[in-house]
């Protein structure tokens, strides 16, 4: 069989070990797929009923689906058909799901380790399950002479399948040792286990744990699961890498206690061993306004010690780097909704050159009630997802005009359609105007959040104007264009810039060769005097090699002739500026009775007074 008990009886350490007869490491990494499931209803948990949506996701992951996938989705996440660890959250399944899941695992054509939560399952069912003969060999991760003996108790735990095609399939059931105190401990009839499980592969030791077992603080008796793991590792210093898995149902992913527990496991458990941690939570993350909360998403991801990754983890399209205080670094799944993400976790040859990619989380597949949906575009996933999330993190205040919420929905639809301007161009232009991107700020948006919030709300309001649409032109500046006039709109809230510097940037832009539609800049600096309003003109400071142009008798403003109409072809690019504050007054000081009149006035200003297009 592919798994055999090492300890016939639970030892004093409170660990029951199983020997598994195939390796997990491939090319220096452990292929790991994390399934971040939909939230399981409380009634399904307490009633121990089926979780059909998770079974459907596992089916697509291991075997595909005739109307959606021609091959197993796991082949996209862990290439080469190598042994793969699949990790699912706490309470991922109920006891009615075991037979269906077991069939899916046994039919898989690659070596697998599936670790998934179950519960709340009656002890009578567990005892009957353990005593039933079948194609899969079944093992108890508890002392069968002392535990799971009461007739009316229920349990929360893990099923750990170990499968090797042609060699057989085993399933080890482990029990949660410490119930969650707010919701589980008061539950009538819920019992706990006294042992944890170790799966000892030829090249890796795996310790599967359940939620609050990771949070239990060390005590004098040395009985906390983290203490037991540390003792087991210390028995073989300098030995095999260690993978600790956590299957969670955690509604507050940003809670500091989790950061403390993660750091304790990966940094303190074994200073002389490579210890990594993989966590699968249900999709409890929600966009949060505060960065210290939002960055943790649903907590699902991979973590390692800061000593191994002193420069932090490398970002990936589906993984966002996080620092866990001074002790650990991690890569959390970007998407806080139901999804599955996979890739190798580096555990061998970690060093200053090789220790860059903690977890190569390249692709994210969303989950729905029918199984696994189409993947997000890998190369655009990070910036598109973070921009999309930005519109949900800052939906605007209740006193704002409803145009803010309406326009943010329009922006989200535009991002989902992958049209131009894309997410990267939108972020760049909101903060840098016509300047090229200096660096990738996808995971550092919080540093510019005051400017981004103001800019994204202003752009959203403009998106509600029937006269404006996304420009749809690759390589051109601005975010929108006039539907009936060939001119672009650029919303620009400059970070760490004064108005004079913004104006110089626009002067340089107008001097560039190459055609471009006229540009209307609705902008303001983050400090200093406002951006100079009106057409962008050259002066001695912008080009000291030539005299400044003569004043235009037509001028600028209401009632003057449009002698300098920027919509007409000219020898150079044309741009004109409007103070962003004029647009902000439309939605920050909202008056429903005056909304239509004020919008019409602003459009008239754009179309007649600014670009001379009539209005």
Image: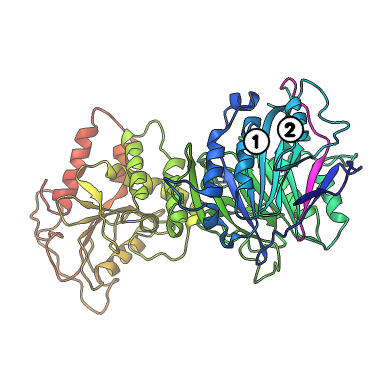
Instruction: State left or right for residue 428 relative to residue 103.
Output: left
- Cα gap from disc 2 to disc 1, whole angstroms: 10 Å
Q: Position of residue 429 (x, y in %)?
A: 35, 58
Which numbered circle lies on residue 529? none
Instruction: Note whether 78 is above or below 41 in the view shown.
Output: below
Q: Are marks 2 and 1 in contact (CB under 8 Å)?
A: yes
Instruction: State left or right for residue 86 relative to residue 483.
Output: right
Tell me the residue at 40%/31% (across/down): 398
Identify the magenta region: 187-203
Instruction: Note whether 307 is above or below 607 in the view shown.
Output: below
Which numbered circle lies on residue 129? 2
Instruction: State left or right for residue 64 relative to residue 229.
Output: left
* In-front residue for pair 406/360: 360
Q: Position of residue 29 (x, y in %)?
A: 66, 62
Instruction: Note whether 127 is above or below 482 in the view shown.
Output: above
| Crowd class of label 2 (few under 14; some 14 to 19; many from 20; radius 10 Å) | some
| Dot placed on the residue nearer the N-terminal end, 2 or 1 | 1
Q: Quadrant of residue 400?
A: top left
* Residue pointed to by mark 1: 98
Asked if the magenta segment contains residue 362, the reply would be no
Asked if the magenta segment contains residue 190, the reply would be yes
Secondary structure, magenta segment, majority class: loop
Residue furthest bottom in the image: 545
Quadrant of the frame with the C terminus: top left
| Crowd class of label 1 (few under 14; some 14 to 19; many from 20; radius 10 Å) | some
Q: Quadrant of residue 12?
A: top right
Q: Position of residue 311 (x, y in %)?
A: 64, 64
* In-front residue for pair 246/442: 246
The answer to whether residue 336 shows anywhere in this view is no
Q: Quadrant of residue 30?
A: bottom right
Tell me the residue at 15%/71% (across/down): 571
Check disc 1 and report its element: helix, strand or loop.
helix
């Amino acid at each position: 069989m592919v798994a055999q008990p090492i300890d016939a009886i639970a030892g004093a350490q409170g660990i029951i070990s199983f020997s598994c007869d195939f390796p997990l490491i491939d090319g220096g990494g452990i292929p790991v797929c994390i399934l971040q499931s939909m939230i399981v209803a409380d009634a399904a948990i307490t009633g121990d009923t089926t979780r059909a949506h998770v079974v459907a996701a596992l089916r697509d992951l291991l075997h595909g689906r005739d109307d959606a996938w021609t091959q197993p989705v796991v082949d996209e996440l862990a290439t080469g058909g190598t042994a793969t660890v699949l990790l699912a959250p706490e309470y991922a399944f109920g006891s009615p799901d075991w037979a269906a899941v077991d069939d899916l695992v046994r039919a898989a054509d690659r070596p697998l380790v599936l670790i998934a939560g179950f519960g709340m399952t009656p002890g009578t069912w567990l005892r009957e399950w353990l005593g039933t003969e079948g194609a899969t060999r079944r093992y108890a991760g508890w002392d069968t002479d002392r535990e799971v003996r009461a007739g009316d108790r229920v349990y929360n735990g893990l099923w750990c399948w170990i499968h090797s095609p042609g060699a057989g399939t085993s399933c080890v059931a482990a029990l949660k040792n410490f119930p969650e105190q707010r919701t589980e401990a008061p539950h009538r009839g819920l019992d706990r286990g006294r042992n944890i499980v170790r799966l000892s592969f030829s090249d890796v030791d795996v310790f599967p744990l359940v939620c609050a077992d990771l949070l239990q603080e060390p005590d004098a008796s040395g009985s906390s699961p983290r203490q037991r793991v540390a003792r087991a590792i210390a028995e073989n210093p300098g030995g095999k890498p260690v993978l600790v898995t956590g299957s969670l149902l955690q509604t507050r992913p940003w809670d500091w206690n989790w950061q403390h527990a993660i750091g304790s496991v990966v940094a303190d458990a074994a200073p002389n061993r490579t210890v990594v941690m993989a966590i699968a939570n249900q999709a409890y993350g929600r966009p949060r306004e505060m960065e210290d909360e939002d960055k943790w998403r649903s907590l699902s991801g991979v973590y390692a010690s800061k000593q191994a990754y002193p420069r932090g983890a490398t970002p990936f399209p589906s993984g966002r780097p996080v620092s866990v205080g001074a002790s650990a670094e991690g890569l959390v799944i970007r998407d806080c909704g139901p999804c599955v993400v996979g890739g190798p976790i580096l555990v061998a040859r970690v060093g200053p050159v090789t220790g860059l990619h903690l977890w190569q989380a390249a692709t994210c597949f969303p989950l729905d009630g029918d199984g696994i949906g189409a993947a997000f575009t890998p190369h655009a996933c990070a910036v598109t997802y973070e921009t999309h999330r930005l519109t949900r993190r800052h939906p605007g205040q209740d006193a704002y005009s409803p145009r803010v919420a309406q326009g943010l929905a329009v922006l989200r639809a535009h991002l989902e359609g992958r049209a131009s301007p894309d997410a990267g161009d939108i972020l760049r232009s909101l903060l840098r105007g016509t300047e090229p991107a200096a660096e990738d700020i996808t995971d550092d948006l919080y540093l510019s959040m005051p400017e981004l919030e103001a800019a994204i709300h202003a752009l959203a309001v403009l998106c509600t104007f029937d006269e404006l649409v996304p420009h749809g032109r690759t390589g051109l500046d601005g975010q929108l264009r006039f539907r009936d006039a060939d001119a672009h709109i650029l919303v620009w809230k400059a970070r760490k810039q004064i108005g004079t510097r913004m104006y110089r940037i626009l002067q340089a832009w107008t001097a560039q060769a190459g055609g471009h539609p006229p540009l209307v800049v609705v902008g303001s600096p983050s400090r200093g005097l406002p951006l100079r309003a009106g057409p962008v003109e050259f002066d001695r400071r912008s080009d000291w090699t030539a005299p400044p142009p003569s004043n235009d008798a037509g001028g600028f403003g209401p009632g003057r002739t449009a002698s300098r109409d920027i919509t007409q072809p000219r020898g150079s690019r044309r741009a004109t500026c409007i103070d962003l504050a004029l647009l902000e007054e439309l939605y920050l000081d909202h008056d429903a009775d005056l909304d239509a009149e004020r919008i019409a006035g602003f459009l008239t200003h754009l179309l007649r007074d600014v670009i001379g297009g009539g209005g």
